[in-house]
Image (spheres, grey):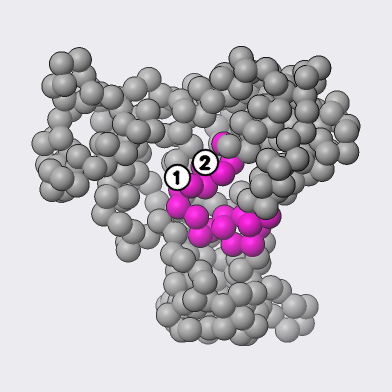
Amino acid sequence: MSRPNLTTSMATRLVDLMRRSGLEEGAHVTEQWAADELEVSRTPVRKAMLFLTEVGILERVPNRGFFLARDAGTLARPDLGEGENVEQSVYFEIADDYVGGRFTGSFTVADISRRYRLTPRQADRVLSRMEAEDLVRRKAGGRGWEFQHVMATVDAHDQSYRFRMIIEPAALLEPGFTVDVEAFARHRRQQEALLHGDILLLPRAELFQVNASFHEMLVGCSGNQFLLDAVRRQNRLRRLIEYRHQIDRSRLAGQAREHLRLLDLVESGDLKEASAFLSAHLDKVRSIKTGIGGES
């Protein structure tokens, strides 16, 4: 199963350490203390602390160091480590195996139980969740399960982003485009919350949904149901492969800031600039996630 990158993993361990230590808002968090407690060198700790500063969990004061921006007791553990729920862990392991080409063909509840060391009831709950998210379906006649058609290759993921670069910027230029004031305010709060800790703290599925629904909301404001249906279908198809990217959260702060900038542009009425900005935003994310036409 894929693991978080070093910065994300170390940041998660540091959050756990601060919670176990009962640190309160304003507590001084030193690199040496964290390195000693986690039994690692100061270099990865510093990178993790800079990331936690970027997402609003720590505050960096020049010439003084890092300080906790909120009580550690409010920092819920994300689904990135050994302590995550067994069914949640297997859910992502199945997704990763499928995307990685290690899980093909049809299967039964018994197959899932045996392969992932679950009870039949646990396996059934995992498959029920995946069915509700349109990732798997029961075979005709009810004998076994199979995956729905979803993206599982880098090339398909790249093509999906290129398709979105055609559809989403065009939606902002539709003659019927109207800002949904209430929806804009709700999504602004969600994106700001990402920059105040939620990037690290939200479960992968919820993190994906926050950002996918942001793009659906923008396209929905176009008033063109065909464009909205196309974006919703893309989000359903790319869900599994996107879950793999959520284990590395170190780049998501920049994306959240760009989402907020996009809201500003749309609310200012400069839809042409907003459309161009959205296209560039999608292309940047495409290059990061697929490694095609840019740095991976």
Location of residue 197 by image quarter: bottom right
Query: Element under label 2?
Result: helix
Q: Please state the horizontal and vertical placement of residue 108, each as a whole percent of the image.
A: 15, 30
Residue shown at 61% from the left, 14% from the top: 226
Identify the magenta region: 191-212
Q: Are marks 2 and 1 in contact (CB under 8 Å)?
A: yes
Given the image, on which type of amino acid does mark 1 rest? Ala
Question: Which quadrant holds residue 160?
Answer: top right
**Circle 2 sits on which residue?**
209
In the rendered structure, does residue 154 fall within the stretch colored magenta? no
Q: Which residue is mark 1?
A: 205
Q: Is residue 98 visible?
A: no
Q: Amino acid at mark 2?
A: Gln
Query: How dense is the environment of label 1, judged by Cα within 10 Å: few (below 14), some, or many (20 and up)?
Result: some
Q: Residue at x 52, y 72 (%)?
A: 74
Can residue 28 be spotted in the picture? yes
In front of the other: 258 or 221: 221
Badge 2: residue crowd in 10 Å (few <14, some 14–19, many ≥20)? few
* Label drawn at residue 257: none
Above or below, 92 against 74 in this view is: above
Q: Position of residue 97 (x, y in %)?
A: 31, 36
Magenta span contains residue 200: yes
Quadrant in which the C terminus is drawn? top right
Q: Position of 61 compared to 35: left or right? A: right
Give the main secondary structure, helix, strand or loop, of the magenta stretch. helix
Q: Secondary structure at mark 1?
A: helix
**Mark 2 to mark 1: distance in Å?**
6 Å
Residue at horizontal 57 percent and vertical 66 percent from the top: 48
